[in-house]
Image (spheres, rainbow, N blue to C red):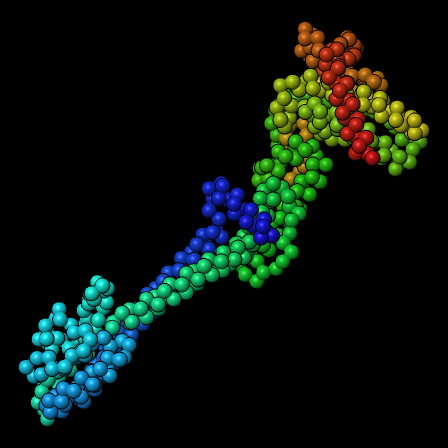
Amino acid sequence: MLFRYIEGLILSFRSRCVPIAFKLALTITLLISSGMILQGIAIVSDQSKLMQREMEQMGETITAQLADSAGELLLAGDSLRLELILNNIIQYKNIKGATIYSDQLKKVVTTGIVPEPITITQRIDSPTQKWIHNDAQLKRSVLLSFIRPLIFRDLTVGYAELTFDHSLMESARNSAIESTILTTIFMILVGIVVSFIIGVRLTMPIHRLINVSQAITEGKYSYRFNDRRNDEIGSLMNALDTMSAGLLRKEQVEKTFSRYVSPKVATEILQDLEQIELGGKHVYATVLFADIVGFTSMSEQMSPEEVNSLLNEYFTYVDSAAHVYQGHIDKFMGDCAMVVFGIPEEDEEQTFHAISCALLIHKLTKHLNEKRIKKGLPSVVFRIGINSGMMLAGNMGSKKRMEYTVVGDAVNLASRLSSVANGGEIVITKEIQTQFETTGEFVLQKHDTIKVRGKKEPVSTYLVQSLQADFQHQQDKLIKQIVTNLDVAES
């Protein structure tokens, strides 16, 4: 899981998209780093001030003690004992010099380093002096001098001065700074690791949400979250689960709906659910009626289950043929299938497609008949009528029960043509024949002139014999493909 997440981060960087985990880790790192740096500065500053104050207090205390013990000796002129005291004091590691001055500011006894760059008057005026000393080897050292008056019976009889090595405190302070810096760096590194882990853990559910959202966008609605969280992300997970379940249900309803009506019609209806109402519009379309010859007598000799199986099997082939040529099944009426071309989607070659579909239905029926005869099952033959013209297309019925279909004289004529056709025949009107009179796409033969109820003039009809050779070759390929797909579906 972590490897996939890191891989996702790399892909995000390549796509110039900064991952939220990186932003979160960077923010946490900056907060930790800023806090540690400020804390380190505060610690170093406090330690430096504390060490400075302790050293000054120590220097003032030792100098004051020297002044207390040296006052009487200075008055007595006991230089030997004063020198002994100073030699003992200078044995301390951090004391670099000691001097006893008379009340005339003359050196009485001195040992070690004396702050010569600063006059005695300046040192008395400012009892604590920090200064730089360079020895014979030009080695630089920072020194701190303290001077205190020698008081005997309220009289100033002289001055005592001690010089301390300030570099010890500098070294201690530098050590404190180094340790603080190392601690800060360590904490920053720990903070980076911890913040990255926290960022990964916090954003991993977000990436799962993104993946699920992408899956939903791609139409994969079966994914569900197995874990449950009692936070905002958990609420979002539950919402996505509910939404994907609803979309899955909607998809199932749409698929089921598409089985009851044409997929093209179902798509048009579902695209504009708010505008579903009774009514329609006049369109130019082509209608094909395919009717089974002698079905009534045949069904009387079969059980209802056998009739249902027979119709379903043959109508499956009819539906496949309609789909190939951009038509859609408007309805199945007993043993008759009504196929519409050019509506709801416009089709400039709707008439060509309708006739080609009719020829394909006959050929597929022949193939299916051969299979059924081998199994000892009854076979059927279709008679087909095709007509084109203006018709009303839209929602017909009532507000509670409606269907999308086409009605009009052109539809009635197509139905009438199928009723006058014989088994295996395809009957079209003179108007359709005229469209292909010069193109040679079909082999057509003049048929009967029929009288249609409601029309004053008789209707001239033609029979469709076959497709032109080149189109016939293409259709033969389609037949093999359709048969293969249907055989696979049946198995």
Q: Nearer the viewer, residue 230 or 154?
A: 154
| Residue depicted at x 79% and y 10% | 448
**For the view shown, which residue lies furthest in the front direction?**
80
Where residue 392 appears, as percent x and y from the top left, is 64, 26
Q: Quadrant of residue 43?
A: bottom left
Q: Position of residue 478 (x, y in %)?
A: 75, 22
Q: Is residue 121 above or below residue 266?
A: below
Q: What's the residue at 64%, 52% (across, down)?
A: 224
Q: Is residue 58 above or below residue 289?
A: below
In the shown orientation, is residue 37 left or right of residue 257? left
Query: In this image, 205 relative to 173: left or right?
Result: right
Camera-nearest residue between 476 and 76: 76
The residue lying at 91 percent from left, 36 percent from top is 303
Position of the C terminus by quadrant: top right
Residue 255 location (% of width, % of height): 69, 39
Q: Between residues 375 and 214, which one lies in front from this camera angle? A: 214
Residue located 21% across and 73% down the image: 144
Side (left or right) of 116 relative to 35: left
The residue positioned farthest toward the top in the image shown = 438
In this rendering, does residue 318 appear at all? no
